[in-house]
Image (spheres, rainbow, N blue to C red):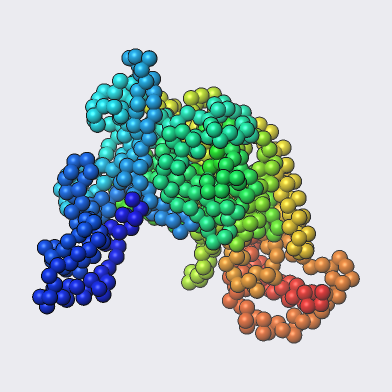
Amino acid sequence: MALQQELLPGKHLPTLTHCFIRLLEEKGLLQRLFTQNIDGLERVCGTSPELLVEAHGSFANAHCVECRQQHDVLRWRDCIVLGQPAYGIGSVNLSERWVDLVKTDKVVAKVTIPSDKDPSHDISVEYGVRLATTTRAVANASDEEELCFEEFVQQSDLPVGQFPAPSELVRSVNEMLSKVSTGGPSVKFGRNGDFTAQLQMVRTLRPAPSPGFAEPTSSIPPRYDSTTDSFVTGPLRLELRPLVATVFKDGSLTTPWDIFHNVSPADTRGHFLLLPTLSDPDKNLRGQIFEPSDCQDMVHLTSSIEPPGSLFLGFNSAGAGASQNHIHCHAWPSPPMSLLHQEEAPVITAAKDEKKEEVENNNGWDSYAATKVGVLYDIYDLTDSRVEASYLKYPVFCVQLCAVEAELDLLGQALKVTLDAVGGAPFNIGFLNRLEEPLLDEGETLDKVKFVDVFVFARSKERSQAVPSLKMGISEMMGVFHAHSAQELELLASELANTVQALKDVSFQDSEALWTSIKQKLADLDRQVAAETRVPKELSASTSVGQEWSTTQGSTKGKNRRMKCHRAHSSLPQNAAAGIRSCACVSIYLGLETPEGQQCFMFGVFRSVINIVFSIILQVHVLFRLSLHCSECLARTTIMTSSHACSYSCYSLLVRMISLSRALIL
């Protein structure tokens, strides 16, 4: 199937040989052309069909294997799938792969459920995602076909479309699906503040949990057993699904990662499983435990998401939403369909997005309740703000780790020690990337910087008494609830307090002690990194636990509340940024506590006086930009005037000269 799709018309052009054969026909010298190629390039070049003998057939006269009718093979490829955003990872276009999977009926699964009428006879049910012609396309009657994804459920041993199904569960699912319009990609949802709940009834048919995953209370899963692993054995094993891709990411991963589609997608636009490659069973056949190597790999995979923010990656531990005991992460388009529109919406409505451009331009990072938090309890800057850890004021315990793309290895280490502090408590991890540019004066431009954000949620249990039927995972932690019934949707959408209470119920109990432990682990990592690099380490800025503070001052958007200094300094030329090691901490290491440091200081002053004129000429533009960003850094503790910022910039030049002089002497 992959080879046939590669040879579809429209991807390749005729060669010189094809053109030469066409020339023979024009000269009246071509009697017959025999070919075993199926790509149809002879026809594309203009060779008359009556002169062709296509020994192996071609796409020009393709027929359906079921109805035996001839069809245009380009019909499904060139159609417009409404609302399908662009997203990919590791140079793999997952959006196109998903469309191909749905077109070829691969996003389909079969389950067996008990019959309501006859308990002794089980019912075979087929469910999944398929393409359907939109009502808008039918009304317009245009030549350009418009399709949309739709969920379906049907009894597999009955003719397609025969209703009602004998199972009450299947009947209720179909009744709800019929109420949702098929005029575009739609989902029934309710929104309250930054939180949203969307109806996911088809996912109620997903496979049963692995043994020991029914009601776990710890992130440590049962001992791994390949004989009960549904990913490697049974009717839903991964080897029966097409391998979407294997990502290597130019050697930065500890192991290649395989990508498969999820047979019970949470999003009709795409839902994938990411797992360490199955081609290395000795290393990667293991349970749902997030190991240090996974920390490194996932931050690197997140950085490769294109466009930035278009894909969300998530991990559920045992006791926090995981249902299968095989290491895997989830990936789906970002933002979810229920968050595509930012304007006010009714409590319960249908979200439809008919303009592809609107979907592609939506900010996938700044859409979730967790990413919109503008108030922090505390913050810890790791190794001069190379990685920033923020303790968010959020209903469930949440720590956000953030770093630029150049610091992914350190970010992975920070994630590892954070999970060490969480220990055996259930947890979820969310991964997003974003592309931002520093705030500058009018007319100033700097290259955008790519960031990776990791959200770690520490839990106490899997379900809340507020919504006891809902098993909450990473999506719920980010603020998007997957309701499995109309009653759940109504409960979550009717009152904001219900969603907030659901998150509070499952949050880690002793949150302050956990944050203290995380800071201690980060401090240990700080010292380890400082010892390895032999770089003087300044004290990191950290407020006391329980002291709430907002970092949105001086920022036009809440998303700029963190990593502003790091973002600015990473964008400047390296020689200019090197002179300021810890602007975010408002501390500059001078080394004046020793005689050697005093000697360096005097020598640095002497060097600065000699070279000050040349330095100003060469660095005036850089210093102007640096003064802006440094003033934003210091805005955490005080509001600087323009004269203060200018003075600080001049002082920064002096410190830079001192640090350079000390480097020459020592």
Front residue of 282 and 30 = 30
The residue shown at (35%, 23%) is 123
Q: Position of residue 521 (x, y in %)?
A: 73, 46
Front residue of 468 and 651 = 468
Decide if residue 115 is on the left or right side of residue 656. left
Q: Up-down: is 145 above or below 268?
A: below
Front residue of 460 and 647 = 460
Among the 4 quarters of the image, the one containing residue 254: bottom right
Q: Can residue 192 be seen in the rendering of this structure? A: no
Q: Residue furthest right?
A: 595
Front residue of 394 and 263 = 263
Decide if residue 217 is on the left or right side of residue 166. right
Q: Position of residue 11 (x, y in %)?
A: 30, 62
Quarter of the figure that contains the C terminus: bottom right
The residue shown at (61%, 69%) is 626
Count of marks placed on residues: 0
Q: Up-down: is 436 above or below 480?
A: below
Q: Can residue 633 be seen in the rendering of this structure? A: yes
